[in-house]
């Protein structure tokens, strides 16, 4: 069919380069090429056994049909307790909407509150879906640069300079994809106050909340100014290595829940029932696997960052959370997009150009170190060899 039938909005939708590079890497593998995968943002560990067991039992027990649109009530209550405890706030089960993965929460938040022409401030470099959906709805995206010299955070006055009476929403993401940076408690308090003063809503993407190495996780929701204006996004994909179960949630201000429920009815109907039963086990069962995974990521991070910093032309800050290294490659005489392509084709290392995460990502490469130490070591050797021949 000719593309003339497609809407402009759909034709201009952005994408996640991680899925594109993964597809290309798989194609090269099918032609016999050996690839080290450092592109896709998913833990390389299996879903913990206790969670799988409950999920399988749930299928046998008949949790295979439509369920309540916003999620099973007992699961919503358990999520509310979890969020209340981990964020030090008071959340009710009625504020929780369970979604197929956490990604729809971004869509539902934008569809609920952003009108064409509204301004939305988003981190750059940042998760590409934010900008893509702001554009889709006809909003005006206002990038908030995250500079390496600020450890991939931002100065508060840089935020204030971007907020005006057209600003409807601010995206926050900490720990951050793609930089591994985090936002500090004092900054979050100041951000909440600015949003309260200018009547700006917040989407706090906390999907990496449990994957933080040396600091205590801090949520903007703990501050008074963020109350009733924040959508909190979290889920199971990263913490419990459940990317394929498609299980996430949003905690919405009470006044938004009805509109989100309607959006769910009109798009997904509900989230898979057996996944929700597995989610109950994830939150209430033993947490040892989370601690073990975090320790493995810490070891890999230390090994990888030390190795990267030994390669001439590359420098990389130590990420504070998530499982991404955002390496500065601006001394290498290639655009980061070209470097991404040549590392894959010529060196067999799949990674992502920083500009896939926004214009301020140019000059960087994102590596996901969700891979074994052995494979990470192999990738470091291949990158060094490739660069030495340039
Ligand atoms: C910052 C961020 N938010 C949200 C998501 C979406 O997670 P899910 O797979 O649960 O939809 C991701 C996944 O990569 C992410 O990196």
Image: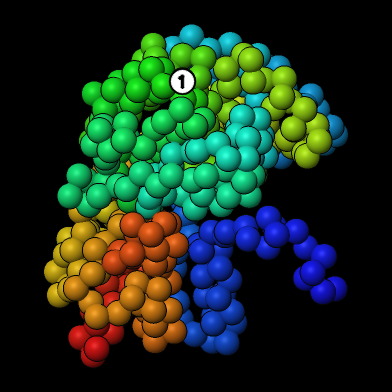
Residue under label 1: 199
Q: Residue drawn 51% across and 64% down?
A: 17
Quarter of the image that includes the N terminus:
bottom right
Q: Residue drawn 34% across and 59% down?
A: 361
> In this rendering, would 148 be left or right of 287?
left
Q: How is the image coloured?
A: rainbow
| Quarter holding residue 269 | top right
| Quarter holding residue 190 | top left
> In this rendering, would 230 be left or right of 308?
right
* Residue 359: image location, x then y, percent: 38, 59
Of 329 and 291, the residue lying toward us: 329
Q: Is mark 1 within 8 Å of ligand 1?
A: no
Please tell me whether residue 218 is drawn above or below residue 311 in the rendered image.
above
Tell me if residue 295 can be seen. Answer: no
Please tell me whether residue 309 is drawn above or below residue 42 in the rendered image.
below
- Label 1: which secondary element: loop
* Residue 55: image location, x then y, percent: 68, 37
Of 21 and 53, the residue lying toward us: 21
> In this rendering, would 358 be left or right of 328?
right
Quarter of the image that includes the C terminus:
bottom left
- At label 1, counting other C-alpha atoms closer than 10 Å, the crowd grade (few under 14, some 14-19, many 20 or more) is some
* Residue 114: image location, x then y, percent: 60, 34
Q: Residue drawn 52% across and 44% down?
A: 140
Of 343 and 254, the residue lying toward us: 254
Tell me if residue 194 can be seen. Answer: yes
């Amino acid at each position: 069919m000719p593309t003339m039938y497609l809407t402009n909005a759909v034709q201009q939708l952005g994408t996640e380069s991680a899925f594109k590079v993964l597809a290309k890497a798989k194609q090269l593998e099918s032609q016999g090429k050996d690839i080290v995968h450092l592109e896709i943002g998913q833990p390389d560990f299996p879903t913990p056994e206790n969670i799988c067991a409950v999920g399988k039992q749930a299928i046998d027990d008949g949790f295979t049909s439509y369920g309540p649109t916003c999620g099973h009530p007992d699961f919503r209550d358990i999520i509310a307790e979890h969020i209340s405890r981990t964020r030090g706030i008071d959340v009710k089960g009625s504020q929780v909407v369970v979604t197929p993965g956490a990604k729809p929460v971004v869509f539902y938040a934008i569809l609920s509150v952003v009108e064409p022409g509204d301004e939305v401030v988003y981190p750059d470099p940042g998760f590409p879906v934010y900008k893509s959906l702001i554009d889709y709805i006809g909003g005006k995206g206002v990038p908030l640069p995250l500079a390496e010299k600020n450890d991939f955070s931002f100065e508060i006055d840089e935020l204030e300079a971007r907020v005006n009476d057209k600003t409807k929403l601010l995206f926050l993401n900490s720990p951050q994809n793609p930089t591994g940076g985090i936002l500090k408690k004092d900054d979050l308090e100041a951000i909440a106050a600015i949003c309260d003063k200018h009547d700006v809503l917040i989407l706090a993407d906390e999907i990496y909340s449990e994957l933080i190495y040396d600091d205590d996780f801090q949520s903007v929701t703990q501050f008074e100014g963020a109350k009733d204006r924040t959508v909190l996004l979290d889920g199971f994909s990263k913490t419990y290595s459940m990317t394929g179960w498609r299980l996430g949630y949003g905690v919405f201000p009470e006044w938004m829940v009805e509109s989100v429920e309607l959006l769910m009815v009109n798009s997904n109907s509900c989230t898979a029932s057996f996944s929700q039963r597995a989610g109950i086990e994830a939150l209430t069962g033993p947490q040892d696997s989370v601690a073990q995974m975090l320790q493995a990521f810490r070891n890999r991070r230390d090994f990888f960052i030390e190795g990267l910093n030994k390669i001439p032309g590359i420098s990389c800050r130590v990420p504070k959370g998530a499982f991404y290294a955002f390496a500065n490659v601006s001394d290498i005489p290639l655009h980061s997009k070209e470097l991404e392509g040549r590392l894959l084709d010529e060196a067999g290392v799949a990674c992502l150009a920083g500009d896939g995460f926004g214009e301020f990502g140019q000059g960087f490469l994102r590596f996901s170190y969700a891979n074994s130490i052995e494979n990470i070591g192999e990738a470091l050797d291949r990158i060094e060899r490739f660069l030495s021949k340039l």
